[in-house]
Amino acid sequence: MKRTKYSDVDSPFIRKRIAETRWEDRGIIDDLITLYWWVRRAPTTASSARAYVMLRKRLHDEWVTLFREYSKEAYARWLQESERIARNHDRLRMRYEAAARAEEQAELEDWIRVGGRRPEET
């Protein structure tokens, strides 16, 4: 039997999705297969890398599933790095919010100093 793009894929996730998807809706399956091959072998041209990033954003949950299927070790490293980045983001957001509150308080004090009303006096 001649193999095709659908039978060349050995991902259980994609096989399951094929079984659940109507032929008329196969476009999503074609996108998943493209993503599958890029997970296994990174894009080699700038245009394909750009398409990969767009597809990865649009199908993020599916990408995570395919990535986890392909390499559990690499997935674990990616997950740890993602969690570290999220913690850093939260820490930076809290600093930014505290700085913004302090700046607003300083502006309010300056406002009052030049004769402006306090917020509760309005």
Image (cartoon, rainbow, N blue to C red):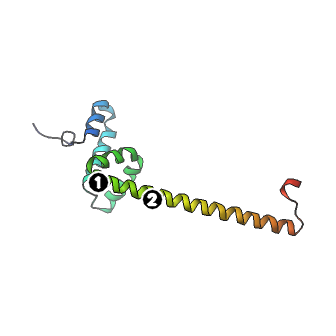
Identified by mark 1, the residue type is Glu
Residue of label 2: 84
User: x, y percentage for residue 114?
Assistant: 87, 69
- Residue 77: name its quadrant: bottom left
Q: Residue at x 86, y 65 (%)?
A: 112
- Residue 39 appears at what percent x and percent y? 29, 52
Residue occupying the point 18% across, 43% down: 8
| Left-right relation of 53 to 112 | left
- The x and y percentages for residue 68 are 31, 48
Q: Earlier in the sequence, mark 2 or mark 1?
A: 1
Question: Is 5 placed above or below 115 here?
Answer: above
Q: Nearer the viewer, residue 18 or 85?
A: 85
Rounded to the nearest angstrom, the CA distance separating label 2 from label 1 is 17 Å
Q: Secondary structure at mark 1?
A: helix
Please give the residue where the numbered disc 1 appears in the rendered image: 73
Quadrant location, the N terminus = top left
Front-most of residues 32 and 94: 94
Q: Identify the element where label 2 is drawn.
A: helix
| Number of other residues with Cα within 10 Å of mark 1, as a class: few under 14, some 14 to 19, many 20 or more | few
**Residue at 28%, 58% in the rendered image:** 43
Local crowd at mark 2 within 10 Å, few (<14), some, or many (≥20)? Answer: few
Q: Amino acid at mark 2?
A: Arg
